[in-house]
Image (tube, rainbow, N blue to C red):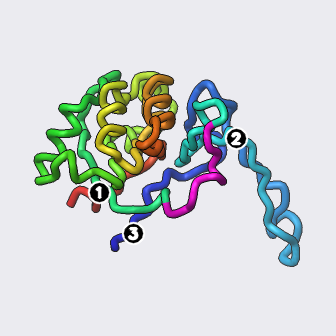
Amino acid sequence: MRLLDLSQPLFDRCPNCPAHPPVRIDIIASHAKDGPDAWHMEHLSFASHTGSHVDAPLHKIQNGRSLDDIPLERWTGSAYVVDLRGIAANASITIEMIAAALASRGISADQISDCWVLLATGFGDKRAATREWLHEPPVLSTAAAQWLVAHRARGVGIDHFSIGDAAAHAVLLGAAPPAPPVLIVEELHFPAEIFA
């Protein structure tokens, strides 16, 4: 199995969802300031959905499962990267886009069952406090969210701070039995080696 770090760095004043409080990371003790025998310590202040993060059903579904109610194994597994780099700002990520990107790699929709589908839009490389990144990302359509549920994807990830609107979140996280919820990972970064 190949393991790659897909996380975005977290740092003081890093870009994040504009509806959330700004990220603050203050060094409150350091070796340089307090001497070589001192401790290095930072004070962190940010919303729980900052940087690379997961959405448990409770994030959108009243009385949904919280993160600690989900077995760790559900957050692992095989993944298919859907290369959507070059997608326009404000675009809707459709079933057709996902299916075509998978098919171009010889992957059928049936093969995504119990696997992660990772949407590489290129916006992870654009991460900055710009109008485009903050307010105009491509988002998963509700129909595509329903398609992922119908094909029993284990989870879906995207390289932006949100997979989509409230309806897409509700469809993914609120999947009705027998289908389990489609877990969400947001604000990923896809290194170039993934596409080599």
**Residue sitting at x 34%, y 45%:** 152
Q: Position of residue 46 (x, y in %)?
A: 70, 41
The residue that mark 2 highlights is 46
Of the numbered discs 3 and 2, the one sitting upstream in the chain is 3
Which range is magenta?
64-73
Q: CA distance from mark 1 to mark 2?
A: 29 Å
Q: Dividing the picture into quarters, in which one does residue 17 lie?
A: top right
**Residue sitting at x 57%, y 35%:** 16
Determine the secondary structure under disc 2: loop
Tag of residue 192: 1
- Mark 1 vs mark 3: in front: 3
Q: Is residue 141 above or below residue 123?
A: above
Q: Dividing the picture into quarters, in which one does residue 180 lie?
A: top left
Q: Is residue 63 above or below residue 7?
A: above
Q: Position of residue 94 (x, y in %)?
A: 26, 29
- Left or right: where does residue 17 sit relative to residue 171? right
Q: Position of residue 11 (x, y in %)?
A: 62, 49
Q: Dividing the picture into quarters, in which one does residue 30 lie?
A: bottom right
